[in-house]
Image: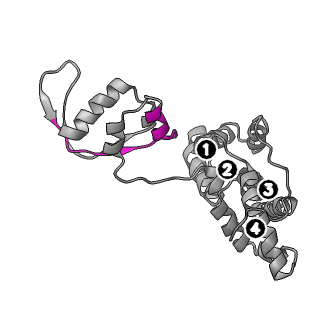
Amino acid sequence: MGGTAFLDEIGEMPLAVQAKLLQVLEHKQFTRLGGTDTLSVDVRFLAATNVPLLEQINAKKFRNDLYFRLNQYVIHIPPLRERVEDIPALVEHFLSKYAPMYGRERLSVSESTMGRLMRYSWPGNVRELESVIQCYALTGREEAILEKLAAHPGDKTPQLLGTYRQCEKQLILSTLVEVKWNRRRAAEILGISYNTLRRRIAAYCLDEQEPELPCGARRLLRISAGDLP
């Protein structure tokens, strides 16, 4: 037996099952439920989790030995709100998946709606985006996308007009001005990482729009705001 086994949401695995999985990882053997024969297995295991496993260990909900057995190589995937450039490709993927399922072959998303998708905070991550696009494919109404987003009680994203690149630039600039160019504070408000914000500022040449101050004064302003370069 070979191949790859993907264990999704491993942080939710019961402790009793974790013990059995650890035995498989250690000895590469298992016995089927109700069986008596010991079977050998040569499988690559991939595990995914949404919850911090170290916190689960401290709460006695995850085995320490299993954590270190699995923690050989880690791939960190940022939340969707920190990689909005992936949203158009994901929308296209989900449309190609669900539109034929509901007999709608020519669905697309307008620039204004795409801008709304890219400004949304996505608390439910990629699965929420998939649900929104599936609803669009089911109804055939692009308005269903906006209705789904507007129904989320935690969405505080301001409504802006224009293409999604124009909207993103406008949103970032207005936030920076509001916090007097404290980049770390702006990143917190926008719900993205500091490095992501720096890349966006460079991509949109927003540094050129920062108010001109004497060199020493600008550095003092940044240090006082806790926004070290």
Query: Is residue 46 magenta-colored?
Result: yes
Tell me whether circle 3 and circle 1 mark residues in contact (CB < 8 Å): no
* Residue type at tag 2: Leu
* Residue type at tag 3: Ser
Q: Give the CA separation, mark 3 to mark 4.
A: 38 Å
Say which residue label 4 marks: 223
Q: Secondary structure at mark 1?
A: helix
Q: Earlier in the sequence, mark 1 or mark 2?
A: 2
* Label of residue 205 in the image: none
Label 3 crowd bin: few (<14), some (14–19), many (20+), radius 10 Å: some
Tell me whether circle 1 and circle 2 mark residues in contact (CB < 8 Å): no
Q: Residue at x 77, y 41 (%)?
A: 155
Q: Earlier in the sequence, mark 3 or mark 1?
A: 3
* Label of residue 107 in the image: 2
Q: Residue at x 76, y 37 (%)?
A: 154
**Where is residue 40 drawn, in percent x and y?**
15, 37
Residues shaded magenta: 40-58
Q: Secondary structure at mark 4?
A: helix
Q: Nearer the viewer, mark 3 or mark 4?
A: 4
Q: Residue at x 67, y 45 (%)?
A: 122
* Label of residue 112 in the image: 3
Q: Is residue 155 visible?
A: yes
Q: Give the CA separation, mark 1 to mark 2.
A: 22 Å
Relative vertical location of residue 73 with respect to residue 51 in this rendering, above or below: below
Please indicate whether residue 223 sits to the left or right of residue 53 in the image: right
Q: Earlier in the sequence, mark 2 or mark 4?
A: 2
